[in-house]
Image (cartoon, helix red, strand yellow):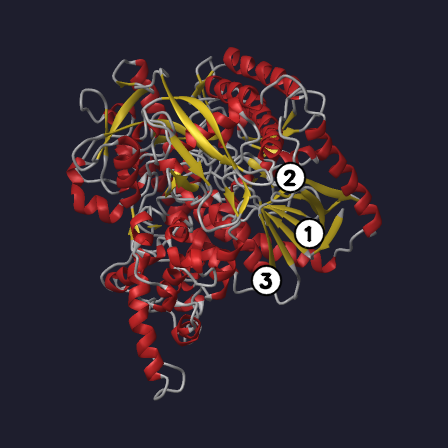
Amino acid sequence: METIKADIVIVGGGGAGLRAAIAAAESDTGQSIALVSKVYPMRSHTVAAEGGAAAVTQPQDDLEYHFNDTVAGGDWLCEQDVVEYFVAHAREELVQMEHWGCPWNRKEDGHVNVRAFGGMKIERTWFAADKTGFHMLHTLFQTSIKYPLIKRFDEYFCVDIVVEDGRAQGVVVIEIATGRICFIQARAVVLATGGAARVFRENTNGGIVTGDGMALAYRQGVALRDMEFMQYHPTCMPGTGLLFTEACRGEGGYLINKDGYRFLQDYGLGPPSDEPRNKFMELGPRDRVSQAIWHEKQKGRTIDHPHGQVVHLDMRHLGEKKLRERLPQIYELAEEFMGLDPAHEPIPVLPGAHYTMGGIETDGRTATSLPGLYAVGECASVGIHGANRLGSNSLVELCVFGRVAGDEASSYAKSARNSSTATLEKKADDICNRVRGLVNNANGKERIADIRNEMAKSMEEGCGIYRNAPVMQKTCDKLEELKQRYRSINIEDKSSAWNTEWLLAIELGYLLDVAQAVACSAINRKESRGSHQRLDGYEQRDDQNYLKHTLARYNSEGPPGIEYSKVKITKSEPGIRAYGEAGEKAEAERNKKKGAAHDK
Amino acid sequence: MTSNDKIIEIEVLRYRPEQDEKPFLQSFKVPFTDDQSVLQGVQYIKDYLDGSLSFRWSCRMAICGSCGMMINGVPKLSCKTFLREYYPGKITLEALKHFPIEKDLIIDLSDFINKLESIKPYIIPAAPRTLEQGEYLQTPRQLDRIAQFSSCINCMLCYAACPQYGLKPDYLGPAAITLLHRYNEDNRDAAKAERMQLLNAHEGVWGCTLVGYCSDVCPKDVDPAAAINRNKLNSTMDYFLRFVAPRGGN
């Protein structure tokens, strides 16, 4: 087996991985950076993010507002010191993206323009039409080409982290085109592998979003934090789950039920107004909007569609010109995939699994509990999203914490020493044999697609928008069963070059482990908070017992161990989480209290 | 609309480098519904008929650029091409033309990646700006000059469509020239002269014989042919200006 030596290895070539690689390359240490990605970097799922990236920009806005929106939006499960760092560094990172060429939309005077987004008090979302993630990803990828220290391993698939002497010291990868397995030795490892929403059936994610880095860190004993918090995006294409950005509503789109009624006013988000109003109605946070759609379905006020019960995203009043300019991709999706013209017809939509709020537990500097191992982006839980992420916070997260991860990995690698290469190679060899064994011994009867489909369906049933113990238990049991059956899967393809069936089997293993962490974390949280909503006697938020992070710890013999850790509160005590008119009242109350406290 | 009563024949050009001397056609019968894409068709084959069939895909929504293939001889993204358009006829799928095949529908695109890297696809400013100075100003009209040309998803359909690339693999080709043009036209950039040297070479813009098929097949309306034509003019100007200006025309 070949050994390749680098100072830092980064797994994942999406926004977070690329930003980390550039930061490390700019660190003046001359360190070599191996950037491993199972797809060409510009294919990474950052590419599909549509709406935008948030940073305090306008004079009437304030870091405090972005902080409050994020912490309340996360139902107070955020690490507040990390959120403070995040909002304070958001703008400079977006300016940096601008200097690197990102084609942000502009105002007439040439400054960057911003749009409204759900749960944000002031318009602060930078955007590049409705392809913001695409433009950010291509900008980062193309900029990374400037740095000779970044050596890319495009279409290399990571199968394990090599841990020796209690430290991460490299990764084992498959060169997909040939099937050759190599060991990339490094003194620091950064995981930037993205989320895991493919564990759900109806989801917005690309096929590559299979929780790889989460599963790898988890199997090495690093906790997965807050995995029960999976975001359902309210407006997805029925059947495929493809995303219609929240910017559709930021630009003024309505959500209506079968009676043409803007139903969000019945769920504490009103009163309605014709023009979009921040934190009201369609600009409520995603968890609340998805929950409202669920309730409409129970009330029989949704619309029959071949792929389920839907509501309508109505943008007819915005007119074709504005839609083509601001939402060209949405227009294309509606026209080409659904055969309808959004300027003249409403778009049928339903909620779909979209984003993994939880992830690999890190501190505010992206370090995991395993020395030498860092995690960043959707695969990580650095602490800014809490129980519900606000739209347009995650693209900024990639930049702010991607940079931190690159800096931290670089300074760690400066002082760390590798164990002897022979010792590490022995470990890597064992991993190599195990991974080859998977394909050689996979002559069972179980079909990969069957296990994957049963998993995704069970996750949707047990861990969807509303949850209860018996159904969650069924999902937990199902996952145990599927993990057993996984041991006797069949891989027909025994070849080496581009054996994508082999890779699908490995990814399925990752998905099952992550799904189990989600389901077991969910059943143990006996309260309702953010995107985790229960209907079995735990309908309320319970700060007494559950103002805590869930930590799921891997157990090779069965379900994970579940532990809890403290939430860092700095300046925002948990309060009433409200939107619309009630939200304004709650905010006035909070300010009054604060004012009174100041007066004392 | 979603009942699975229709069956379509999908013929795939297979090539498994370890066992096949040359590519061969294999036929599959695939049940489908009217809203299903060609990508969903090949996914069905992989899941239920032949696990060894290999192809690239990810986002399913025509933005990641992975899933291009020849569909009945035309380069298309399989995620936004629908099976119903071909039924009751059959569909023939092949790897994108003009590229070496790595396996089945998977091409080797390293030649394009090398070209993309060679054109300096990043902003090279006249004087670097600090973060404290904030963003560069760029008016909506200045943005318009690059917006279309920065929308390329690198899906390679235009290379599969380009007869010149088929004949002369050194030709820089539609997507790379478009990207070069995108950076040259960006008011934040000052490296046009450097890039024009690359473009002036024989493999640069002059490889194009104005067929325009690249723009016809582009799934994102980027119009690479327009970028190439503008650069023929630019390249001519640059050639003559070279005699009067020290670093070429800018």
Residue B50: name its quadrant: top right
Tell me where residue A192 appears, x and y as whole percent. Answer: 57, 45
> Closer to the observer: label 3 or label 2?
2
- Looking at the image, which residue is at 26% across and 23% down? A266
Q: Amino acid at mark 3?
A: Ala
Label 2, secondary structure: give it. Answer: loop
Q: Which residue is mark 1?
A: A188
Q: In the rendered image of this protein, does residue A93 appear above or below residue B104?
A: below
Label 3 and label 2: CA atoms lie apart by 39 Å
Q: Earlier in the sequence, mark 3 or mark 1?
A: 3
- Looking at the image, which residue is at 61% across and 29% down? A505
Q: Is B87 on the left-hand or right-hand side of A427?
A: left
Tell me where residue B19 appears, x and y as whole percent. Answer: 63, 36
Crowd band around label 1 with a 10 angstrom C-alpha radius: few (<14), some (14–19), many (20+): many
Q: Amino acid at mark 2?
A: Glu
Q: In the rendered image of this protein, does residue A58 appear above or below residue B102?
A: below
Q: Chain of mark 1?
A: A
Crowd band around label 3 with a 10 angstrom C-alpha radius: few (<14), some (14–19), many (20+): many
Label 1 and label 2: CA atoms lie apart by 36 Å
Is there a contact, CB below 8 Å, between mark 3 and mark 2? no
Give a yes or no on whether discs 3 and 2 share a subunit: no
- As rendered, which of B229 and B193 lies closer to the eye? B229
Give a yes or no on whether discs 3 and 1 share a subunit: yes
> Closer to the observer: label 1 or label 2?
2
Crowd band around label 2 with a 10 angstrom C-alpha radius: few (<14), some (14–19), many (20+): few
Q: Which residue is mark 3?
A: A25
Is there a contact, CB below 8 Å, between mark 1 and mark 2? no
Q: Is A353 on the left-hand or right-hand side of B101?
A: left
